[in-house]
Every structure is written in C-alpha cells, then in structure tokens.
Amino acid sequence: MIRLDRFLANANVGTRSQVKKLIKSGAVTVDGSVCTNSSAKIDENSCITCQGKIIVPLANCVYMLNKPAGVVSATTDGVDKTVVDLLKKEGRDDIFPIGRLDKDTEGILLITNDGALSHNLLSPRRHVDKTYLCVTNKPLTDEELRLMEEGIDIGDDKITRPSKISKTTLEEACNTYNIAMGNVVSLFERIDKLSDYTADLVYSYYLTISEGRYHQVKRMFSHFGGEILYLNRVEFAGLRLDKDLGAGEFRLLTDEEMKLIAG
C-alpha cells in the first residue's frame, strides 16, 4: 500500500505539493471515483487517473554512482548536497541510496527506487561484500594483517567478521579504478592530514568486509593505531566501480549487473 500523493509524485506527475493541489482540486480518480484525500492508500491493483490520463508508475531502476567526497548519502539535507541531488537531471522523485558512504568517502554507491532490492542488499543475513581502497598513515605488520582478516574488537558487542586485506600502492589503485590522483591529494589537504603528498608517507590497502558497522573501516585501522587518510569503495555486491564514471557521474546498471545483485 502507498499514499496517493506519493504514488503520483513517484510517477513524475509533479512534486508532492503539486500533486496535493491536483488531488484537492478533484483532478484525480481512484478506480473511477474522484478522490480528494492525499493520504488515501492505494495498492498495485488500483487504477489511477489524473486530469483524465491513466497514471502508470515508473519502473524500478538502479543507478551506479561514483560518489564524490563532500556529498552526503541522503535524499535531502538542509546543508550539504546529497547523492540524490547529483541525479536531478533524471527527473525522479522516488530514488534513494542503498546504504551510505561517509561524507568524505568516495566510490561506488547504488541509487534506486526498489525498496525490496535495497532491503535484500543491506540485510545482515546476506553478508554482501564491500571492497575499499584504504590509504592510511601507518603500515600494518604481517601479524596485524592476519588479525585484521580473522576479526578484531572495534568496540562493539562482537568482533568483526572475517575480512580480506591486501597491500597495494596508491598509484596502482588509482590506475586500476581510474581515480584522479588530484582528488586524493586535495582530500588530504582538506582534512589536514598531510601538508605535502609523498608516496612514502602513506600506505594503501584493499580491504573487503561483509558487514556495515558504523565507521567500520576507520575503526578497524584505528584498532592498530592507524588513521584513514583517504577511503574509496571500489566494489559493492560483486559490482566494480565503472572506470568510465568520473566523480559525481552515474549510469543505469546493465541487465547483467542487475542479475548479479539480484542473487
């Protein structure tokens, strides 16, 4: 069941305030009868018309977004630009992010209007893999790498689930995922971690986790005395960040990608 005004807004009839006015004016019918109650509940079998035209809901969609730093993972925000704002030209009022990335974290984020898919991908029972490029100010020893993979205490009720971690270089990672080195360096400067970038001052790792605790990646490195300087999610649920997507750019998932995340 869904509210009538939300159904019409999701079908791009107008904004929520605009459709409320249309409903109040008597321009909307539900199963052949005029309905002036914006909060009336309808279901998938209801026949809705507006100004004599049958309204068909928009199909489900999933976008891959390369989230830039400085943008929040929300539908609306009174201060910052949101990930949904980046997709405004799509003209959809019904989309939202699947999960979230921190404001300063970059990388792959899925945007959809499919609540069931979102619930499935975020379900703790499914243990969806998420891979991050982690740039830190402290190298991990072989023993710390082993402990990181086995599970560590980050202050919650239980230790983290087993993870996978491997060393890389910032240059290699930027080339692999088409990450602009300038964006990385500017992030260092913005967060006042390093005054000047030099390769021997930072250490880069790929970390794959299968849960999503609050600030989990940052807390895992903090457990060993390290601080995250730059974080980019490069893979999510088997999907790899599209190298052709620059920061802030997006595209619809392909049929093959849809099948992959639907599993």
Image (cartoon, rainbow, N blue to C red):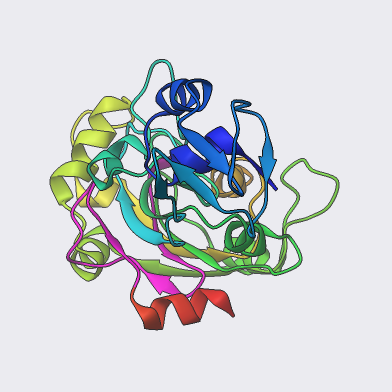
Q: Is residue 79 left or right of residue 210?
A: left
Q: Position of residue 7 (x, y in %)?
A: 53, 43
Residue that lies at the very extreme toward the top in this rendered image: 78
- Residue 142 on the magenta segment: no
Q: Is residue 132 above or below residue 163?
A: above
Q: Determine if the magenta segment contains residue 243.
A: yes
What's the magenta region? 228-253
Instruction: Locate the C terminus by quadrant.
Output: bottom right
The answer to whether 159 appears left or right of 191 in the picture is right
90 and 15: which one is in front? 15
Give the left or right position of residue 65, taking residue 1 as reference: left
Q: Residue at x 63, y 69 (%)?
A: 146
Q: Residue at x 27, y 26 (%)?
A: 190
Instruction: From the top left corner, tell me how far across and down residue 156 is, in percent.
Output: 79, 43
Q: Position of residue 95 (x, y in %)?
A: 45, 46
Can you tell which quarter of the image residue 82 is in? top left
Q: Residue at x 35, y 33 (%)?
A: 71
